[in-house]
Image (spheres, grey):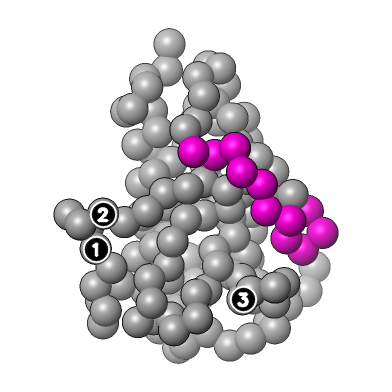
Amino acid sequence: MEMRRSFDLGAEDEEFLTTYERPWETIIDGSHWVLIHDFTVPKGYNHEKVTAAIRIEAGYPNAQLDMVYFYPPLKRIDGQPIGCSDAQQQLDGKIYQRWSRHRTAANPWKIGFDNLGTHIFLIEEWLEREFEKCPAR
């Protein structure tokens, strides 16, 4: 499958995605999006790999990146609910699951430091931390 590049990311973000070693695309579907395919999900979810979609906000990199969208939708295999993940987003002909996760005053977006790579690391942390909020049975 050929990876679409509907818009250019900055050199720092493209370099990160190259070293991240997962197929990725940039698309425009109402907003600008980065799709990361074969995104590895920790054990405990119903899928081992998904596509993670990140909306590139107007004004980025000075404007923060926020949330993540997964296709196919994730569920915990222990049946515990995943908070703030019920909303859906039509994107690229599929229905993505929105994980409403945000930075806090204790972990604000730092202009000149934070970027797509730090946001992806935060997404990985959200996936792991889900089991700390409500441990698997």
- Asked whether the residues under the numbered discs 1 and 2 touch, taking CB atoms below 8 Å apart as contact, a structural biologist would say yes
Name the residue at 47% across, 55% down: 67
SS class of the residue under badge 2? loop
Residue holding disc 3: 32
Q: Residues within 10 Å of mark 2 (few under 14, many from 20)?
A: few
Q: Where is residue 55? Give x, y as percent.
A: 55, 67
Q: Residues within 10 Å of mark 3 (few under 14, many from 20)?
A: some
User: Which stretch did the figure color magenta?
Assistant: 84-94
Q: Is residue 119 left or right of residue 86?
A: left
Q: Is residue 85 visible?
A: yes
Name the residue at 80% across, 68% down: 1
Give the CA separation, mark 2 to mark 3.
24 Å
Q: Is residue 85 left or right of residue 91?
A: left
Q: Where is residue 22? Give x, y as percent.
A: 57, 63
Q: Is residue 94 above or below residue 18?
A: above
What kind of residue is marked 1? Pro
What kind of residue is marked 2? Thr
- Asked whether the residues under the numbered discs 3 and 1 touch, taking CB atoms below 8 Å apart as contact, a structural biologist would say no
Residue holding disc 1: 108
Name the residue at 59% across, 37% down: 86
Q: Is residue 27 visible?
A: no
Residue 60 belongs to magenta span: no
Give the CA separation, mark 1 to mark 2.
6 Å
The C terminus sits in image quarter: top left
Q: Which of the 4 image quadrants contains residue 45?
A: top right
Q: Is residue 49 above or below residue 74?
A: below
The answer to which of marks 2 and 3 sits earlier in the sequence is 3
SS class of the residue under badge 1? loop
- Asked whether the residues under the numbered discs 2 and 3 touch, taking CB atoms below 8 Å apart as contact, a structural biologist would say no
Residue holding disc 2: 104
Give the CA separation, mark 3 to mark 1.
22 Å
The answer to which of marks 3 and 1 sits earlier in the sequence is 3
